[in-house]
Image (cartoon, grey):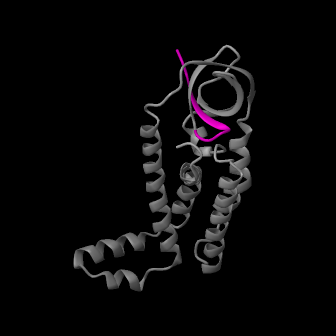
Amino acid sequence: MKDDWLIKVMLYVLSLWLLFVSLLIMSYDATLLTNVAEAVKQRDLNALCDDFNVKNLVFVVSALFILVGGLILWLLANSYRGGWSITCRVSDISDENHEHLEFLATYVMPLVFTDVESKRTVLNLALMIVAIGAIYVKTNKFYSNPSLAILGFKIFKATIHDRGEKQFVVICRGQLTDKSVIRYIRIDNNTCLAKLDK
């Protein structure tokens, strides 16, 4: 997974999980669910298409991305079961957890209260999500992930002593100190996922 843009895109989609949950709530329409049930019962999709609107599209896409986010979380959890480094010491640790809040406040919160009934606004929302994603991946800020923060992960900058010294952005569950011993897996040249070695 080293230097792989795919994992960065996956982490970006995961970072928008809260936005998609919010959009799902904002676009909820009981009529859509009734129409889906009727279309399934009568085996007639035309009836469903007649009443389908922009708000329903936002609901369906949000539900789909919430499921995709869950799948990404499962894939990431399983892909990191092996391949950990030998135990290493860390030093020069600085807390970077403000990155989660900055991403949430700067990119996610302004999109939360989008008018989901206007075609123009929804098109603008989609454009902003794609543009923010491109910036997110190109600037290697994929670790600024509110969803990971909710799951208990913290962000640190630290020097890892492993056959030399190199400074990394470290994503870790738990608190790193100058006495911590970790195992890690590189996500890219400057970022790694670490676990405290007990």
Q: Residue at 42% across / 69% down in the picture?
A: 30
Q: Position of residue 195 (x, y in %)?
A: 55, 26
Name the outermost residue toward the left. 42
In the displayed structure, 179 sits above or below 168; it is above
- In the rendered image, which quarter is residue 163 located in? top right
Q: Residue at 47% across / 45% down in the picture?
A: 73
Q: Position of residue 62 (x, y in %)?
A: 50, 62
Between 59 and 88, the one nearer to me in the picture: 88
Q: Position of residue 80 (x, y in %)?
A: 47, 35
Between 165 and 142, the one nearer to me in the picture: 165
Q: Is residue 134 left or right of residue 71?
A: right
Q: Position of residue 94 (x, y in %)?
A: 76, 28
Q: Is residue 40 left or right of residue 120?
A: left
Magenta residue span: 187-198
Q: How many marks?
A: 0
- In the rendered image, which quarter is residue 180 located in? top right
Q: Is residue 35 left or right of residue 1?
A: left
Between 175 and 60, the one nearer to me in the picture: 175
